[in-house]
Amino acid sequence: MKIMNKRTGLIALFVLAILFPLIFQNDYYTHMLTLSFIWAIAVYGINLLAGYTGYLSLAHAGFFAIGAYSLGLLTVKAEMNFWPALVLACLITSVVGLLIGVIALRTKEHFFAIYTLCVGYIIYLVIDKWDGLTGGVRGLIGINAPSNIGPITFETAESQYYLVLTFLVVVIFVIYRIVHSLTGRTFLAIRNSEELAQTIGISTMKNKLTAFVLSTFFAGLAGALYASFVRFIGPDIGSTAIMFDLLMYLLVGGIGTLSGPLVGTLMLVILSQNLQFLQEYRMLIFGPILTLIIIFYPRGISGSFFDWKRKRRNQTGNVLKPIKVEEG
Amino acid sequence: MLKLTDVSVNYGSFTAIKHVNIEVTEGEIVVLLGANGAGKSTTFRAISGINKLDNGEIYFQNRAIGGRAPDKNVQAGIVQCAEGRKLFPQMTVQENLRMGAYVHRRKKTEIKHSLENVYELFPILKEKHHHDAGSLSGGQQQMLAIGRALMSKPKLLMLDEPSVGLAPLIVEQMFQVIEEINREGITLLLAEQNANAALSIADKGYVFENGEIVVQGTANELLANDDVRKAYIGA
């Protein structure tokens, strides 16, 4: 019964997502939602590492930018087709992720956060200063929309929305499978206690590296989609400001939960769009909201919701059923 | 089976254990006695590979293993059940046990077999296999920690203070289980403060003080030793 409810809920949500552009017929809304789905993919990547493995990386806006610039340069300067360029962009990001991960993962906790913050900033600087390749502050213009697959084209806002939605659903499904596999439990074991994980025979370095590379892969994918969707990219997409936006989406939504990245990203992107008229003063509203959430809902909206449901289930005496904190 | 020769471990400028010599023969129960901070846990951590050695060497089945990665040691059959019943509280009992079989993760039928063995040894775990590990009582958590260690099919099992913080009746059960594990052919290295109970099942023991072994001998010799009696048994 329980599962049925959950499944129907998910299907309803999915149908709603499919119908959305047809109902609203408003390019602005469709555009905004597409963009938040792209950010959500990046946040899912961060969540795999920060939420499930316990390593808070602040370099992921940098990896997002690497994905975006790889796709931009491959399609604009090398005149490659969108699809092979997309695959290549993800691979390039993962390879850079692997090289950085090997070094970064020798540090732990706040040292890891500080180290990756520096890495992120260096990536931003390289993009900003390497005029010859990236176009520097002028950015990269004229990136093409995704090329068509057979008769399907991606020129309109709706078709791009559906393309990004497809990627998002696949990403969520893949993350779901990872989290519920032995690999996912290994990540959890590392988050729980690295030393304990070692004593039961887990090679922690290998698994941390797997988590790191996977998470950069998703960040790169999000970046590549962003580049072909917005058609213009500047070095700012790799800036620390973007990094902290992504982190904020994750924290508000619920770190270490499956739905958190999507919930947090959607909420905050929509909220921030509605507060657009306040310009920079938006942060005056965002700041207190974030503080309140961290104080009262440290596991974010999704995390706290599932905690609350679990508590309620326990109170109704239904304690014999399997209970999982990590659900959601 | 296991031999430590002249092993020293430093934490920065502080020497946790110095010039430790231990020998464990296959099939034995060997107990390490000593107060908190005497060096028992550090010795375990050195054997399992978590701490690097600053001096000496460790041999397991005649091969030098000093400084080898912990996961390689688990594969070779050395597993440590850490002090303080460390579990994965957000996983169920069964998931915890399965994590213990991590080094055998590709052998599905073998894991199933080990799982049955552990459930036979600790029936209560089978009863609670769907519960969160965090919801178990202290004694059950200790059983789960031992069960998880057994899932890796160790040749040498190291138990760090299995009786700490448990009710006297449970402590008695715990030592019965330890004997049973030993009868199944697993060599045991035990760190304990409960010297009386530990020595009653052990073959021999080593007494640690300030990171050094001060007394060693068979279990009976140690039980008869006045200093040991005064310091650890209180009679």
Image (cartoon, coloured by chain):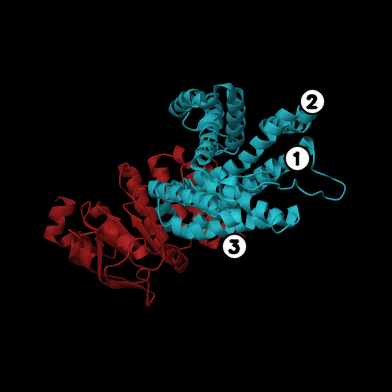
Chain colours: A cyan, B red
The reply to whether the C-beta atoms of the residues labelled 3 and 2 are less than 8 Å apart is no
Residue bearing mark 2: A23
| Figure quadrant of the C terminus of chain A | top right
| 1 and 3 marks on the same chain | no
- Name above or below for residue A291 compared with residue A197: above
Spot occupied by residue A124 in the image (x, y as percentages of width and height)? 51, 49
Q: Is residue A191 visible?
A: yes
Q: Amino acid at mark 2?
A: Ile
Host chain of mark 3: B
Which element is circle 3 on?
loop
Q: Is residue A80 left or right of residue B181?
A: right
- Name above or below for residue B210 compared with residue A301: below
The reply to whether the C-beta atoms of the residues labelled 1 and 3 are less than 8 Å apart is no
Q: Give the label on residue B107, or none.
A: 3
- Foreground residue, A16 or B19? A16
Spot occupied by residue A9 in the image (x, y as percentages of width and height)? 70, 30
The reply to whether the C-beta atoms of the residues labelled 2 and 1 are less than 8 Å apart is no
Residue bearing mark 1: A160
Query: Label 3 to label 2, Cα distance in Å?
Result: 52 Å
Q: Amino acid at mark 3?
A: Lys
Q: Amino acid at mark 1?
A: Gln
Spot occupied by residue A86 in the image (x, y as percentages of width and height)? 69, 53
Q: For mark 1, does the 10 Å Cα neighbourhood hold few (<14), some (14 to 19), or many (20 or more) residues?
A: many
Q: Closer to the camera: disc 3 or disc 2?
A: 2
Q: Is residue A161 left or right of residue B93?
A: right
In terms of sequence position, does the residue under pointer 2 or pointer 1 come before the other? Answer: 2
Query: Label 2 to label 1, Cα distance in Å?
Result: 16 Å
Which element is circle 2 on?
helix
Q: Is residue B200 visible?
A: no
